[in-house]
């Protein structure tokens, strides 16, 4: 038995023991799909953080945590008689073979610019086989909203429902900003309409990123990091001056913010 197979068997055995209702861990034993779903999502984000940091040891550790989530879900399913971890592996193996007929079948090797369309055509056929009809069918509602917005826009664009020019999206962003401004100035404010207008502006921002060839989530991650660094700089400088953040004016903090931007450049 290879080391990979042995280690996978170990984690399967460990999970079965943890889930034992009599001798296992009380917390693990009472979990179900819904209760551990948030942990699964969290672990996926921690994998992304490890990739961003470039720390391979951390990446190995976080991938292990994510693998545990897969084993956990599969164990719950096995207990209720739905499927097993072997079924999970078989399902994804079959899917990857089906999606790569140029590697595992007789189809000719597509050009790089053709492969994306081939992939989408095969996935479309898979969705149709599951009864997920319609251009937007099968896009998970539980996806992070920004990722789902991007997915919806890409699907719509694949059938020609797209702005031909990025300048038109910028114009649309100005239009949505004006509508948001009008709602902010309305008396009294309508919370639902205000929320709708903020959502419209965010949706257009995702569309602008897509059209510019920028992943909006990656861009926002970078922006968050930049904001943290600059705000931390403000706190550090205020501390050197013997001032707390609560004692400082907005003007003080804005001056230090500009200093942080200059220092970074």
Image (spheres, rainbow, N blue to C red):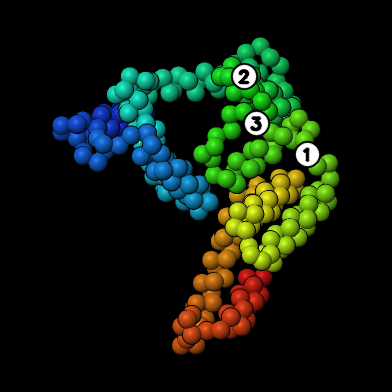
Q: Give the quadrant of residue 191.
A: bottom right
Residue picked out by circle 1: 162
Of the 4 image quadrants, the one containing the C terminus is: bottom right
Q: Residue furthest bottom?
A: 242
Q: Nearer the viewer, residue 237 or 33?
A: 33
| 208 left or right, relative to 78 | right
Which residue is located at x 74 percent, y 58 percent? 179
Residue reaching furthest to the top: 106
Residue 195 in the image: state x and y as whole percent.
61, 55
Q: CA distance from mark 3 to mark 1?
A: 14 Å
Q: Report whether 175 appears left or right of 14.
A: right
Q: Do tag 2 and tag 1 residues touch (Cβ < 8 Å)?
A: no
Residue annotated with mark 3: 136
Q: Position of residue 27 (x, y in %)?
A: 24, 41
Residue nearest the observer in this picture, 140 or 97:
140
Specify whether 230 is left or right of 207: left
Residue at the image position 64 percent from the left and 72 percent from the top: 261
Label 3 and label 2: CA atoms lie apart by: 11 Å
């Amino acid at each position: 038995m290879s080391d990979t197979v042995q280690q996978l068997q170990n984690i399967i055995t460990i999970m079965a023991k943890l889930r034992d209702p009599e001798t296992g861990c009380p917390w693990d034993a009472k979990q179900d799909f819904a209760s551990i779903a948030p942990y699964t999502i969290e672990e996926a984000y921690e994998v992304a953080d490890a990739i961003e940091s470039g720390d391979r040891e951390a990446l190995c550790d976080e991938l292990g945590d994510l693998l545990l989530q897969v084993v956990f879900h599969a164990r719950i399913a096995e207990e209720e008689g739905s499927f097993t971890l072997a079924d999970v592996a078989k399902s994804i193996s079959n899917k990857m073979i089906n999606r790569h007929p140029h590697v595992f079948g007789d189809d000719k090797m597509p050009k790089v610019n053709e492969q994306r369309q081939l992939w989408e055509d095969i996935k479309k056929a898979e969705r149709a086989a599951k009864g997920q009809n319609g251009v937007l069918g099968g896009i998970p509602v539980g996806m992070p909203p920004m990722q789902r917005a991007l997915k919806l826009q890409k699907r719509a664009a694949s059938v020609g429902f797209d702005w031909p020019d990025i300048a038109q999206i910028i114009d649309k962003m100005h239009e949505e900003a004006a509508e948001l401004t009008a709602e902010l100035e309305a008396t009294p404010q309508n919370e639902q309409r205000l929320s709708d207008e903020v959502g419209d502006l965010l949706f257009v921002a995702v569309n602008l990123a897509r059209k510019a060839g920028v992943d909006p989530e990656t861009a926002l991650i970078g922006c968050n990091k930049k904001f943290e660094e600059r705000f931390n700089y403000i706190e550090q400088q205020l501390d050197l001056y013997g001032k707390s953040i609560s004692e400082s004016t907005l003007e003080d903090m804005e001056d230090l913010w500009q200093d942080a931007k200059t220092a970074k450049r």
